[in-house]
Image (tube, coloured by chain):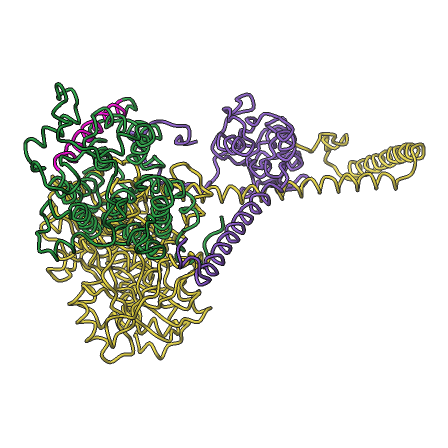
Chain colours: A purple, B green, C yellow
Amino acid sequence: MFPFVNTAYFQIPAITLLSASILWLIYITTRYLRNESRQQQRCLVDQINALLPQTQCGHCGHPGCLSYARAISTGAAINQCPPGGQHTIQALSDLLNETAEPLNPSHGNHSEPLIARIRELECIGCTKCIQACPVDAILGGTKLMHSVIESECNGCDLCLEPCPVDCIDMVPGFTGKQWQWALPNRSDAVESEIGEQV
Amino acid sequence: MKTEVYCSPQQHSQLSQHSTGRIMLWVIAACLPGIAASTWFFGWGLLLNILVVMVFAVLLEAVMLKLADKPVKTHLADNSALVTGLILGIAIPPGSPWWLLFTGICFAIVVAKHLYGGLGQNPFNPAMCGYLLLLLSFPLNMTTWHLPTDTLFADQQFSPLSWTSLQYSLQLCFPALAGDGSQISEYIDGFAMATPLIEYKLAGNSTVLAALENNSPLFARASETGWEIINFSFLLGGLFLLFKKIIGWQIPVSIIVTITIMSLLFYEQGSTAVYGTTYLHLFGSATMIGAFFIATDPVSAATTPGGRVVYGIFIGIAIYGIRVWGSYLDSIAIAVLFGNFCAPLLDHFCRPRIYGHSTRPSQ
Amino acid sequence: MSLLSLFHRSTNRRPSRNPGRHKIHKIVGGIKPAANKARSLRSRIMSTPIPEMLVLPLLQHKGTPATPVVKPGDHVLKGQKIAAADPRGVPVHAPTSGKIIKTGQCTLPDAAGTLVSCLMLASDGKDEAIETGLSGDFRNMSKVDLVERIRDAGIAGMGGAGFPTHLKIQTSTASDIATLIINAAECEPYITADEALIREHARDVVKGAEILQYVTGAQQCIIAIEDSKIAALAELKLAIADSAIEIAIVPAKYPAGSEKQLVQAVTGREVPFGEFPASIGVLLHNTGTAFAVYKAICESEPSISRITTVTGSTLKTPKNFHVLFGTPVTFLLDLCGIDRVLLSRIVVGGSLMGNCLHDMDAPIIKTTNCLIAGSLEEFPEPLTERACIRCGFCADACPVNLLPQQLYAHCRCQSYQQAKDFGLIDCIECGACAYVCPSHIPLVQYYRASKSVVFQQQTDRKNSEKWQSRFQFYQYRQKRESEQRIQARAEQPSHPQQIAQAVFSREKARQEISEAVARVKARRANLIATSTLSSPSLSSPSTEPDEKP
């Protein structure tokens, strides 16, 4: 062909360079694939559970979020969780490749985060709410005043039913949500599923 | 006083390169020296091409915007259809019939741009997509350059800028105007090459230098300096864009440097093989247009600085490779499309290091 | 990836072109907007007349709000402490003498218009100052004392972030500070407060810098100023003539005055992600803060005022003011001769990072460095956002070396994991990218909105993990208790014996009760017999239940 290309001065560096590039490409690809597989190794139930809000309220019909996660992994509907709201349903649908249905209203509606508050003057110290609370957020003992530790309460409202004197209210908690910027309105944008805010 | 809440920054740059419509206008302005040179040497064909394609481009863009329910006037104001039309008009050989131009620009604007989502969403350079469609579908038309002269650089029978020349260009573009068509064949000679790149036998010496040695004026049509002057003009336009900071230096410089290196590496003087000099590759062909105007289309190119350098290298290798070892005459379109394929990968890998981070963040 | 490092923007280039001065390193990106600073520097700093009503928010900085130590109706003197703070906050002082009218609520001059509680002070015009202790040479005082005095004076960072200065000093003394940088590089357009301060009080600023250097134990103190501030530079050179402080002249580029970028420009090193500059031995303080420290230590004056630039094209006489905290914004605007017909927007801060103000009665607080009363021509309506054409001008302008075009794409699609990967949290929201974007995309708004969502998601995830672990403990505890119950039941005797025991104990109980009743009856009979009064209520033992429902 051409004289320069025939010489060793060209061929040896060229072949070294070429093989180095090919090896580098292989290295990049294997590293990328290894990262992907590592993520899939994590158990599916754990991945689903990590997306659920962990209120353990039982509104979905299962006793606790882990149990619901197990049910989802065997095919239960993903739209049963009111505290999770639509964004949890969207996250689950992204994970499992299922359609994101709207929240099932028979289990309740998604509301702003609430916490329980006991009217201490009316409390009789029966400890029924303490036994019901799944995260041990109520402080108290028999015949002693009961109080909700507000920073630990997750708003599951499982304590409302057992209370014989109905002295527990659900009040809006301090969510730390202050005024914040919203995504800009794109006035001429064509509405698409990706662009909608959940 | 207004009650809306405006997010910072409260002001916006007023420089011309910070407004899309004005950027596109400057790109068109930068092409004007090259177009003027081409008109001077080879007649009205190129100018007519560009005008017709631009008109079609704007009409098609307006139709597509209407179909997509977007406000037509504000979107046409970003002048992107004009630039696509300009590039395609330069690429298609002068003297092509109007239906060829229409097919090309239709594919470019409708399919390659709007069916992907409009401005900013197309992964491939629309003008080059249009050109490639035409190249594959109408190979004879696309490889026949009609020049209003007998042979390429011989004695002229009439000035390229004359009324006669204009008439013939119009008749080639709109054959319906020709009447019986006999006048065309009398003066037009088909010339089945895009640029003198393939005239490798003539290659090696710059015709500009030859003209200077012979003391013939550079702009005389007989001194055969046409192609090179056109390329110098496009280079000037490109440097102007660089100076105005409308395009980044990474893509043009890496393309030109790569082609220079490759042509130096593989050059062989005096042989009958196809390898021309570096000068030929840079100035005897469409490299300047490709490097400064076609490959720098921001939407389809790589967007990170490092990615752009590698993008330019890939395109340079592809241009040289396809020209020299491939079967297409001028390979800018295919090379640029090849680069467009690689651009997302390059964007993913060639990310700059963020302040305060020691290595690139994990994937 | 080392091959690709060839394409990374280099951060350390050749040394400064100023021989004899401190070496300056190059910073990446940046823009050069029109400065718009000349108008407000034409005249000297003016002291404002004392307004009739001062509104003093109890939270003027980042941290916890202060608690008032005065009641409505109290008469206070200038400089008197009117609200005390916990160790993590700074107290509030009365800027002038007068009467506390009431406690109420006011809006802060920030983007959100946050409502905070405040004290309203009606000035009596006499401006009587409180008696202060003598101030001596700061070198004779211990560092702990100095920090306490700085805290007591209520000094918070005046550059815009408002972090309590004593906290900054205390957290930084844990690590060795090699360099103290006084940030006089006011890079943002319109703001000239620090420049005016240096022009007129350069020596005081230098003294304050020396105090800060002594307190923090920094080996080196550098005042960083932009090269376009020529008059201020001349004053500064005179002022540092007999001190060990150096000047670093940074090229006038926005945002050279941002904390991380200034550290890079002056020292050539980068602040690692997620850490403070103190972790690499650098500490920054604003010029206004240094001046306030000087006032507090050498003149015993607490933090009751600051220099604020009031400018904009709707004002007849824009200038810098020596403003008392609590002065309403509208008072200052009137002093400058505002044309309310032309007024379109009031911006608090500079034109690139400032936010709109809606409540003209909002007070000036410790972090208000500039007010721009702009017309529609100066601040036009933002143009419609267009499609991103991936031109990369934003990436060229970004001082943190991010890829704003990619960040934008991910924020718009709400793929927050990808956005974090591209450096969403690194973004300093300087606005350079949105300033240059040809498609007029409001990039900073996208990033701010996405950051809120990301932080909310982080909080939610922390809460979920906390509740999950508490629930797991709850389940473990239930299991443990039921096991204990089973075990206790297993240790008890078998069934027939249990019944026998129960029966036996019931019998025994009945017997004991009847014996007790008999005893009581006998005692009562004795009482009736021995006493002359009859007590019919004691005839039968009371059987009313004591317990309430």
A172 over B180 or under it: above or below:
below
In this view, the residue in front, B328 or C445, is B328
Q: Is residue B49 left or right of residue B116?
A: left
In this view, the residue in front, C172 or A33, is A33
> Magenta span has C108?
no
Quarter where residue C70 is shown: bottom left
Q: What x and y, as percent, mark residue B181?
A: 14, 22
Q: Is residue C170 left or right of residue B259?
A: right
Q: Quadrant of the C terminus of chain C?
A: top right
B144 over C78 or under it: above or below:
above
Q: What x and y, as percent, mark residue A138?
A: 61, 40
Identity of the residue drawn at 53% across and 45% down: C462
* Magenta region, main secondary structure: helix
Q: Residue furthest left?
A: B163
Q: Is residue A71 left or right of residue B281?
A: right
Q: How many marks?
A: 0
Q: What x and y, as percent, mark residue C277?
A: 40, 63
Q: Which residues are magenta?
A: B43-66
Quarter where residue B188 is shown: top left
Q: What x and y, as percent, mark residue B135?
A: 31, 32
Quarter where residue A139 is shown: top right
Identity of the residue drawn at 69% across and 33% down: C546
> Magenta span has B56?
yes
In this view, the residue in front, B215 or A117, is B215
Q: Is residue C358 visible to the viewer in this orientation of the structure?
A: no
Q: Is residue A191 visible to the viewer in this orientation of the structure?
A: yes
C488 over A88 or under it: above or below:
below
